[in-house]
C-alpha cells in the first residue's frame, strides 16, 4: 500500500499518521520526491482502513499495491535509484560501463585489462574469482587469490570492482569489493540473498536463465527486505529453443523492469549472445532500449582466455563500443515516473 501525501504536509499530523501506522505493525518507507512524499507500507496492510487514511487532511491518495514486490516497486519509490560506488554513479540518467575479463587469471592480465578498460571509459571493473562453471573439470576461478588480484587492479586504477559470490562462506573475502554480483545460477539462492540484505553495499543480481521478470524482482525484494536498498538488476539472456546464440537476450526486459521498478537495469550482451561479434550491436540496442549500463567481458587475448573467450572482446573493440554507445545516449532517455 502507498500513501501519497499532499505537498508540504503538516509535520505534527504526519508524525501522528506515522505513529498510527507503526502501531498497526507496519513498516514505513518514505520516498521524498521533488513535489510528492510517498509512504510505502510493508506488512499486513489488510488491517488498514483505507477510508480513514484517505479522510486525513494531509493525504492526497491511498493505493493498494497488487504486486508481491514492494520495496523494489516503482509505485513505492517513483524516482530512479542511483547507485554510487567509488565516485561513480549508476542509474537515474547515469549510464555506466562495467568491463573486464570473465575471470581473473594473472596479476598482469587483470591489471592490464583494468587499465585498458579505464582508458576506454569503463567506470567499474569486473572479474570473476569464484566461477560457477558447468563442468567441474573446468577452471573454477582463483578464489580468494582472484579477489586479492582484483583489489590490486582497483588500487592501481582507482576503479571500483564487482565480482561474483557463490556461497555465503565466501563473504569474508568481499570486505573491499564494491559491488557483489549474484550470478544467474544463484538468483534464487534465498539464504544468500537474505544475508546480502544485511549488508550496506550494492548487489547486482543477474536474471536466472529461466526466471521471469517478476521472479527477478522478487529476488531483489529479498535483498531489500533486509534493509539493503542498493540493488542493480541485470538481464544476461534467457534459455529459449534458439541455439545459435548462447542465450536469447530479452531486451524488452529493460522497459518492463524499469516501468515496474526504480532499480537500475544493466544489460550483459556477452553472456546473452556468447559471441564477441554480436556484443557491439546488442550493446547499442540495450542503450537504445533505455538500459542504465552495460556489463561487458573484455580480455587482452580472447583466444587464450581461461573462460568465455568466444564472447570476450578486445580492449580496442571495447573502446570503439564505448564511443558508439555514448554517441547515441542523448537519444535514449525515457521517463517512467
Ligand atoms: C559472469 O558474469 O561471469 C557469469 C558467470 O554470469 P552469469 O551468472 O550471467 O552466467
Ligand atoms: Mn563469463
Image: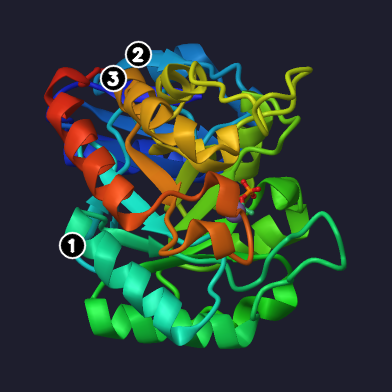
Disc 3/disc 1 C-alpha distance (Å): 34 Å
Q: Earlier in the sequence, mark 3 or mark 1?
A: 1
| Residue named by callout 1 | 119
Disc 2 residue crowd, few under 14, some 14–19, many 20+, Cα 10 Å: some
Which residue, as the protein is rendered here, is positioned at the far right? 136
Q: How many marks?
A: 3
Front-most of residues 291 and 64: 291
Front-most of residues 301 and 119: 301
Disc 1 residue crowd, few under 14, some 14–19, many 20+, Cα 10 Å: few
**Residue 49 vertical placement versus 190 (above, below):** above
Q: Position of residue 169 (x, y in %)?
A: 73, 79
Q: Nearer the viewer, mark 3 or mark 1?
A: 1
Q: Secondary structure at mark 2?
A: strand
Q: Nearer the viewer, mark 2 or mark 1?
A: 1
| Residue named by callout 2 | 61
| Residue named by callout 3 | 337
Q: Position of residue 4 (x, y in %)?
A: 32, 22
Amino acid at each position: 500500500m502507498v500513501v501519497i501525501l499532499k505537498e508540504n504536509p503538516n509535520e505534527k499530523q504526519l508524525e501522528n499518521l506515522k505513529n498510527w501506522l507503526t502501531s498497526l505493525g507496519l513498516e514505513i518507507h518514505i520516498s521524498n520526491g521533488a513535489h510528492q512524499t510517498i509512504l510505502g507500507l510493508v506488512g499486513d496492510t489488510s488491517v488498514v482502513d483505507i477510508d480513514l487514511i484517505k479522510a486525513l487532511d494531509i493525504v492526497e491518495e491511498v493505493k493498494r499495491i497488487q504486486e508481491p514486490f514492494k520495496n523494489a516497486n516503482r509505485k513505492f519509490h517513483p524516482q530512479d535509484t542511483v547507485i554510487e560506488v567509488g565516485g561513480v554513479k549508476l542509474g537515474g540518467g547515469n549510464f555506466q560501463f562495467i568491463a573486464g575479463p570473465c575471470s581473473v587469471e594473472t596479476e598482469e592480465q587483470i591489471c592490464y585489462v583494468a587499465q585498458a578498460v579505464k582508458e576506454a571509459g569503463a567506470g567499474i571493473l569486473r572479474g570473476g574469482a569464484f566461477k560457477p562453471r558447468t563442468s567441474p573439470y573446468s577452471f573454477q576461478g582463483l578464489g580468494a587469490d582472484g579477489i586479492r588480484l582484483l583489489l590490486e587492479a582497483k588500487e592501481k586504477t582507482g576503479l571500483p570492482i564487482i565480482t561474483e559470490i557463490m556461497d555465503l562462506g565466501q563473504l569474508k573475502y568481499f570486505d573491499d569489493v564494491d559491488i557483489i554480483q549474484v550470478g544467474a545460477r544463484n538468483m534464487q539462492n534465498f539464504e544468500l540473498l537474505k544475508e546480502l540484505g544485511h549488508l550496506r553495499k550494492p548487489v547486482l543480481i543477474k536474471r536466472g536463465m529461466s526466471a521471469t521478470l517478476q521472479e527477478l524482482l522478487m529476488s531483489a525484494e529479498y535483498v531489500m527486505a533486509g534493509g539493503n536498498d542498493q540493488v542493480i538488476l541485470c538481464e544476461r539472456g534467457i534459455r529459449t529453443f534458439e541455439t545459435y546464440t548462447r542465450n536469447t537476450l530479452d531486451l524488452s526486459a529493460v522497459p518492463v523492469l524499469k516501468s515496474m521498478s526504480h532499480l537500475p537495469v544493466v544489460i550483459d550482451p556477452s553472456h546473452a549472445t556468447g559471441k564477441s561479434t554480436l556484443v557491439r550491436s546488442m550493446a547499442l540496442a540495450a542503450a537504445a532500449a533505455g538500459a542504465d549500463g552495460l556489463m561487458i567481458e573484455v580480455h587482452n587475448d580472447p583466444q587464450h582466455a581461461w573462460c568465455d573467450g568466444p564472447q570476450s572482446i578486445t580492449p580496442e573493440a571495447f573502446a570503439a563500443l564505448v564511443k558508439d554507445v555514448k554517441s547515441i545516449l542523448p537519444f535514449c532517455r525515457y521517463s517512467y515516473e
